[in-house]
Image (tube, rainbow, N blue to C red):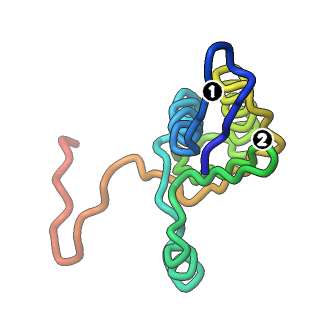
Amino acid sequence: MDVSNSKALGGSLQISTDVIAKIARLATLEIEGVKRVAEPESGVQGFFKRMAAQKPILVELSEDIAEITVNIVVEYGCKIPPLCEKVQENVKTSVQNMTSITVSKVNVIVAAVAEDQPLPEPGEEPEPTDE
């Protein structure tokens, strides 16, 4: 779905929901404590969501008003509620400033917590430390 603006000077303007999702992704990654934008959850719920072709960032438009859902992986040790508030604020501000589309809601789903160090694969020996 695209947002159209027939009031644009000298022609029309269309903004793809993919563009809105890209802006939201970049705004999300600007926040300290966000490790990455995540794929939707796995398991039974995740299976049905993937069947609906859900992306890591979902943009739903209704009458030129956007509702955005962002799936994120957070760094271990960060405080999740204030981090999510910053993500919501930054995504909303960025999308509205760049597109002039009203954002009614930004939903943040914390899909995982990033581990400080990669865990060894099953059957592998952990790497020795210099202690």
* Residue 39: image location, x then y, percent: 47, 60
Q: Which residue is mark 1?
A: 12
Q: CA distance from mark 2 to mark 1?
A: 15 Å
Q: Secondary structure at mark 1?
A: loop
Q: Residues within 10 Å of mark 2 (few under 14, many from 20)?
A: some
Give the quarter of the image for residue 98: top right
- Between 89 and 114, which is closer to the camera in this rendering? 89
* Residue 45: image location, x then y, percent: 59, 80
Q: Earlier in the sequence, mark 2 or mark 1?
A: 1
* Residue 2: image location, x then y, percent: 61, 44
Which labelled disc corresponds to residue 64?
A: 2
- Between 65 and 130, which is closer to the camera in this rendering? 65
- Taking the spot 55% from the left edge, 32% from the top edge, the residue there is 23
Question: Looking at the image, is 42 positioned above or below residue 89?
Answer: below
- Taking the spot 52% from the left edge, 37% from the top edge, the residue there is 19
- Taking the spot 67% from the left edge, 36% from the top edge, the residue there is 4
The C terminus appears in which quarter of the rendering?
Answer: top left
Question: Looking at the image, is 70 positioned above or below residue 91?
Answer: below
Q: Nearer the viewer, mark 2 or mark 1?
A: 1
Query: In the rendered structure, are the residues bearing label 2 and label 1 in contact, judged by CB atoms less than 8 Å apart?
Result: no
- Between 117 and 89, which is closer to the camera in this rendering? 89
Spot the residue most to the top.
9
- Identified by mark 2, the residue type is Asp
* Residue 59: image location, x then y, percent: 64, 50
- Identified by mark 1, the residue type is Ser
Give the quarter of the image for residue 30: top right
